[in-house]
Image (cartoon, rainbow, N blue to C red):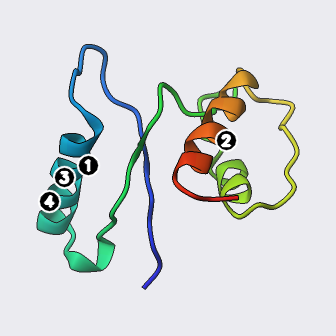
Amino acid sequence: MVEINPLVVTKDGVEQDQISLTNELIQLVRAKIGPVAAFKTVAVVKRLPKTRSGKILRGTIRSMANGEDYTVPATIDDPVILDEIAVAIEELGYP
């Protein structure tokens, strides 16, 4: 089974501590999808890196989590977001 550690963006005004949010998300995923999609940790981030057209840079995030070299796409909306994601990924224990 592959371990999944999702990045989560909360709605504005949500004031919930990370432990209770993680527990709630784990229970929700188990109820909707089943134990095969279970995860143990969640990183709450303020925003996800997107292109100017609104697509999330999943491949770039995956490369960052795997410790691979990546290039910042020319179409990224705000390159500073990648630094924020890098910190969140490090806190989860990735390279």
Please state which amino acid type lies under the numbered disc 3: Asn
Q: Which residue is mark 1?
A: 22
Instruction: Specify which label sits upstream in the sequence, 3 or 2.
Output: 3
Q: Which residue is mark 2?
A: 86
Instruction: Specify which label sits upstream in the sequence, 2 or 4.
Output: 4
Q: Where does the image place residue 72, in percent across and percent down from the top left?
A: 84, 38
| Distance (Cα) linking label 1 and label 4 | 9 Å
Q: Where does the image place residue 77, in percent across and percent down from the top left?
A: 71, 22
Pointer 1 with pointer 3, Cβ within 8 A: yes
The kind of secondary structure element at disc 4 is helix
Query: Which quadrant of the view contains residue 84?
Result: top right
Query: Which quadrant of the view contains residue 9?
Result: top left
Q: Which residue is mark 3?
A: 23
Please state which amino acid type lies under the numbered disc 2: Ala
The kind of secondary structure element at disc 1 is helix
Q: Where does the image place residue 90, in percent across and percent down from the top left?
A: 62, 48
Q: Which mark is residue 27?
A: 4
| Distance (Cα) linking label 1 and label 3 | 4 Å
The kind of secondary structure element at disc 2 is helix
Please state which amino acid type lies under the numbered disc 1: Thr
Q: Which mark is residue 40?
A: none
Instruction: Specify which label sits upstream in the sequence, 2 or 1.
Output: 1
Label 3 crowd (10 A; few <14 / some 14-19 / many >=20) = some
Q: Where does the image place residue 59, in percent across and percent down from the top left?
A: 69, 54
Pointer 2 with pointer 1, Cβ within 8 A: no
Instruction: Specify which label sits upstream in the sequence, 1 or 4.
Output: 1
Whether residue 59 sits left or right of residue 15 in the image: it is right
Whether residue 55 sits left or right of residue 4 in the image: it is right
What residue is rendered at 62% in x and 38% in y?
Answer: 87
Pointer 4 with pointer 3, Cβ within 8 A: yes
In the depicted structure, whether residue 8 falls above or below residue 28: above
